[in-house]
Image (cartoon, helix red, strand yellow):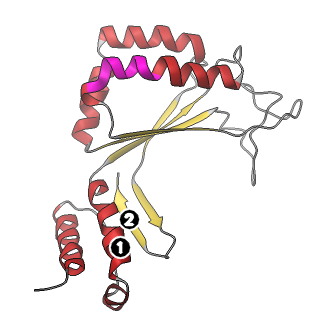
Amino acid sequence: RRPLSVELLEATCIHSRCQNSTVSTIHATALVAAPHRYIRAVTRLLPAIMSYTIVLFVTRNPNLTSEEFRDHYEHTHIPLAHSLLATCWPIEFKRRYLARISRKGFGGPANPDRPPLRLRGEMMELDCDCIAEMTFDSERRFQEFYKKIYAKENAAILARDEEKFLQKGKTRVIVVGETWSTDEHGVTTSEMG
């Protein structure tokens, strides 16, 4: 009987070829040398092989502080949205709030005195307060979510709440293509969606 790590690797590669997904090349010598690392990497990769991910750039209403925006988004809007969309909710929904510093006149229109804490480059075009990532188990599942969120009644309820904490017309949403990831052991994997 072959080792479990080889079977997992083969199953992943066969599944990825069938699904037109890309899985990085894993060298057989490294697999033999450290099978526990590859079992962990492959196990982490399997649920995401055909996932569908969107990223939202969300900007707060300038009449709210960053803290008021975050509190409303987390404690009012997300529970409201979940109550309407629970049957097609993403398998993961992460929200990352930008770190800001106080520096009068150095921010963008939404945050004139509180620019993002940048480590490199300018962010003139990206003046958001939150970067959110929604991952669905498939594009079909995302389409169900999309239809339901824009159903007339749901859209009206969510729009009324969004008026309270979002800057109108500033939310941007994009679809993620490939994602490449390198773990702490230097093992690189890729996935679609």
Q: Amino acid at mark 1?
A: Ser
Q: Is mark 1 in CB contact (under 8 Å) with mark 2?
A: yes
Point out which mark residue 105 bears.
Answer: none
Verify whether residue 81 appears in magenta.
yes
The picture places residue 38, in percent across and down from the top left corner, at 34, 75
Q: Nearer the viewer, residue 103 or 37?
A: 37
The picture places residue 119, in percent across and down from the top left corner, at 75, 53
Q: Nearer the viewer, residue 5 or 152?
A: 5
Mark closest to the chain's N terminus, 1 or 2:
1
To which residue does mark 1 refer?
A: 24
What secondary structure is found at the residue carrying circle 1?
loop
Which quadrant would the N terminus be assigned to in this image?
A: bottom left
Distance between the alpha carbons at the discs numbered 1 and 2: 6 Å
139 up-or-down from 46: above or below: above
The picture places residue 170, in percent across and down from the top left corner, at 58, 25
Verify whether residue 185 appears in magenta.
no
What secondary structure is found at the residue carrying circle 2?
strand
Q: Is residue 105 left or right of residue 158?
A: right
Q: Residue furthest right?
A: 104
Corner quadrant of residue 92: top left
Q: Range of the magenta residues?
A: 78-86
Q: Amino acid at mark 2?
A: Ser
To which residue does mark 2 refer?
A: 190
Residue depicted at 61% across the width and 27% down the height: 59
122 up-or-down from 59: above or below: below
User: Does residue 57 appear anywhere in the picture?
Assistant: yes
